[in-house]
Image (cartoon, grey):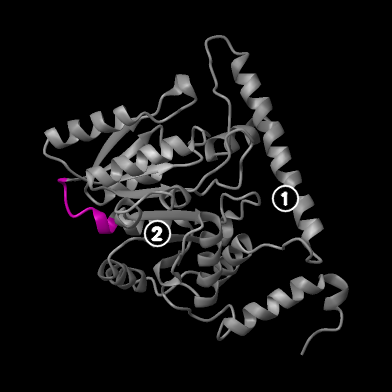
Amino acid sequence: MENPQIRAIFPSDAIARAKTYLKHIKGGLGAYTDSKGNPYIRREIADFITNQSKSASDPNNIFISNGASEVARMILFALIRGSNDGIMVPIPQYPLYSASISLYGGQLVPYYLNEESGWSLDVNELKNSLASARAKGICVRALVFINPGNPTGQCLSEENLRDLITFCYESRLVLLADEVYQENIYNSALPFISARTVLAKFPEPIKSGLEICSFHTVSKGAYGECGLRGGYMELHNFDPLVVDELYKVAAINLCSNMPGQVALGIMVNPPKPGDVSYPLFRREKQALIDSLRRRARLITDAFNRLEGVVCQETDGMTDLQTIYLYIFF
């Protein structure tokens, strides 16, 4: 029975949204869900990916987890069969990848970003890194990229993404797209573009032939809800048998937490123009991003004033930049 005070506290569309989730979450937030995540919320995520990339996303290929780190480790666990298997990782990089590759007994195959050109990606560096690893007998199975970069903060251009996709397809590598900072963009001249969006523009056989695994999370969005532990991966162009095997791995953990799943649903399907909550949502979100942009500008300028220190411009927020901002400001 609805508390009569509730409508004095929350907007009508927020109440309706809560009722919708309760309708589709059997047993409430305290119950187990499917090991891939609640079907209704996976459909919300699939719709988000479809709208963003202009190409269809299948909810059955989406795995919801306790943060994106959990599914990143899951796919690395599946890819690394032994000490001869390697994963290409950008340098500088988020230590999740180097630590997980080491934990699973694989080989980290580094490729270096170009600091002088704004931490850009050079396809020749990718080719040299891959050739060097294969010459050592390493079986390179996948390539990780982080966009916007962590800890560098750069956004990859569409040309960069096309180079990555072409390189991975020709080299028979799985592309692991870490796109968890996609909401935190400061440089309007270089907006975020998802790898799935670029892949959808390719002709066949690349369009349907490249295996791409994309990650996103509520931890790194404008609101930074790290403690709710909600993340997902989408497996695109993967063999259904591979998806089924990963389902078995996910089932070991039973399921991810339900509050984090709901937070994901709200992130990918926020209030829209015309909704009662939309003006407040838009105002609060923009205020947060503007505040982070101002502080990023302050810290960049502060570092560049130091003798012998050069700090590149920031296109988006990253973990290390967040730490710097909280330390200094």
Magenta stretch encompasses residue 80: yes
The numbered mark, 2 or 1, whose residue comes first in the sequence reads 2
Q: Tell which residue pokes out farthest to the top in this image.
A: 307
Label 1 sits on a secondary structure element that is: helix
Nearer the observer, disc 2 or disc 1? 1
Image quadrant holding the N terminus, namely bottom right
- Is 92 situated left or right of 228 in this image? left
Q: Amino acid at mark 1?
A: Lys
Label 2 sits on a secondary structure element that is: helix
Q: Amino acid at mark 2?
A: Val
Q: Position of residue 31 (x, y in %)?
A: 52, 81
Q: Tell which residue pokes out farthest to the front in this image.
A: 203
Q: Position of residue 171 (x, y in %)?
A: 23, 43
| The residue stretch that appears in magenta | 77-84
Q: Residue 285 shows which numbered tag?
A: 1
Pointer 2: what residue?
A: 71
- Is 178 situated left or right of 315 in this image? left
Q: Is residue 21 visible?
A: yes
Q: Position of residue 107 (x, y in %)?
A: 22, 42
Q: Quadrant of residue 243?
A: bottom left
Q: Quadrant of residue 265?
A: bottom right
Q: Position of residue 110 (x, y in %)?
A: 30, 34
